[in-house]
Amino acid sequence: MPTSNEAANLWMAFQDQALRGLDQVAGWRNFLSLSIDPSFESHERLALCRVKDDCTWRYAVWDACADSKRCFQSPETILRLKLRKIDPAYRVATGAVLAEDLQALLHSTKNLRLPVGGASKGVGMDGTFYAISIGDPMMESTFKWWESLPEEWGPLADLHSRLLCILKRARESMAGG
């Protein structure tokens, strides 16, 4: 069995791999995306792709807790982890964004003006990082924060709320309704 330090290093490398992969599994987006990265729960990605008046979402989840147990369950899995031969367990669902939701999202992003950066509000050990990306990988803006939306980014609140509503429907579709 690895020492606690070795296990932590193995896990951090696997987690980096898993989160990079989660972004890829969520798929290419050309409109909006929402990332949710909690300390001790499933990591989620919601990517929205827009073609003219149609918009689809792709929802991807990585269950870090289940993988942390799976990766260290036996000497064989630990060896596979060391050799980077364990793939993260992702779940994926897709669906259509309703026309009225698309119009509201377009309205929420149309005249959005936000300051860049901001003052740090401290350090946290357990909690959740959120990120909203607007645009496509060739020209996008990403706003990332810890726990609660910073006051200076208040104009993102409506967009964040609308994305969370779509996320809720995506979660329900993955759960079977």
Image: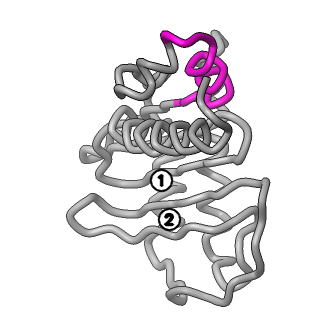
Residue in the picture at 57% in, 40% down: 6
- Identify which amino acid the numbered label 2 is placed on: His
Majority secondary structure of magenta residues: helix
Q: CA distance from mark 1 to mark 2?
A: 6 Å
Magenta region includes residue 173:
no
What is the number of the mark on residue 30?
Answer: none
- Identify which amino acid the numbered label 1 is placed on: Gln
Q: Is residue 134 above or below residue 83?
A: below
| Along the line of sight, the residue nearer the viewer: 55 or 68 | 68
Q: Quadrant of the C terminus?
A: top right
In the displayed structure image, the side of residue 8 where residue 110 appears, left or right: left
Mark 2: give few (<14), some (14-19) or many (20+) Cα within 10 Å: few
Residue 32 lies in quadrant: bottom left
| Along the line of sight, the residue nearer the viewer: 45 or 38 | 38
Q: Are marks 1 and 2 in contact (CB under 8 Å)?
A: yes
The reply to whether residue 46 is visible in this rendering is: yes
In the displayed structure image, the side of residue 45 where residue 49 appears, left or right: left
Q: Tell me how the rendering is colored.
A: one colour
Residue in the picture at 51% in, 20% down: 78
Q: Is residue 65 above or below residue 43?
A: above
Q: Secondary structure at mark 2?
A: helix
Q: Which residue is mark 2?
A: 107
| Place of residue 166 in the rendered image (x, y in percent of width and height, measured from the top left) | 59, 39
| Place of residue 101 in the rendered image (x, y in percent of width and height, measured from the top left) | 54, 46
Most distant residue in the left direction? 138
Q: Is residue 60 above or below residue 106?
A: above
The reply to whether residue 93 is visible in this rendering is: no
| Magenta extent | 61-76
Residue 173 lies in quadrant: top right
